[in-house]
Amino acid sequence: MTKFVVEFEYNVDRAGRQGLYPAHAENLYRLADSGVLLLGGPLVGENAGILLYEAENRAELQRILDEEPYVTGGVVATVRIREWSPGKGSWVAALNGRTPELVGTGTGTGTGFGTGPETGTETGFGTGTETGPGTGSRAEGAS
């Protein structure tokens, strides 16, 4: 699947698009639910918006854009389409359908108190550290 960055520049202001907005929003929600629209939103301080699509090819993207209510309603002055190959950043793994490997360090301590029907009152403590993916150590105290 190919990713495309699409910029819509409008020929009317936000108020001029309000009549078409419900159909536009419904269309974008449908595309997002089907995994075609990855991100989208207005450009702050501009009369434009950016949308990130994932489609089989440029022809498929064009079919999707031809059905967009803002396009069919005539409020889009220009459409700029660029094929995009994301390479770096915190969202890259998610955009490419992978879960990023979590790497980190941390330490912690805790105390606990509880009652149970068979054991009476118990208290305990524990400490633990973990470093990096899949490695670490943990030490616990007894009640």
Image (cartoon, helix red, strand yellow):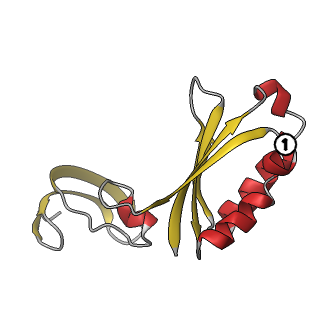
Residue at (72% x, 35% y) in the render: 10
Q: Nearer the viewer, residue 50 or 132?
A: 50
| Horizontal side, residue 69 vs residue 4: left or right | right
List x then y, in percent, for residue 76.
75, 41
Query: Badge 1: few (under 14), some or many (20 or more) residues near its Cα, within 10 Å?
Result: few
Q: Quadrant of the C terminus?
A: bottom left
Residue 35 vertical placement versus 112 (above, below): below
List x then y, in percent, for residue 64.
73, 64
Residue at (18% x, 57% y) in the render: 104
The quadrant in which residue 48 appears is top right
Residue 18 vertical placement versus 54 (above, below): above
Residue 127 vertical placement versus 42 (above, below): below
Query: Which residue was labeled with disc 1?
Result: 74
Q: Which residue appears farthest toward the right when viewing the image?
A: 19
* Image label count: 1
| Horizontal side, residue 139 vs residue 67: left or right | left
The quadrant in which residue 120 appears is bottom left
Quick one: SS at disc 1? loop
List x then y, in percent, for residue 14.
76, 27
Residue at (57% x, 33% y) in the render: 43
| Horizontal side, residue 143 vs residue 42: left or right | left
Residue type at tag 1: Gly
Residue at (68% x, 42% y) in the render: 78
Residue 91 vertical placement versus 75 (above, below): below
List x then y, in percent, for residue 129.
12, 59
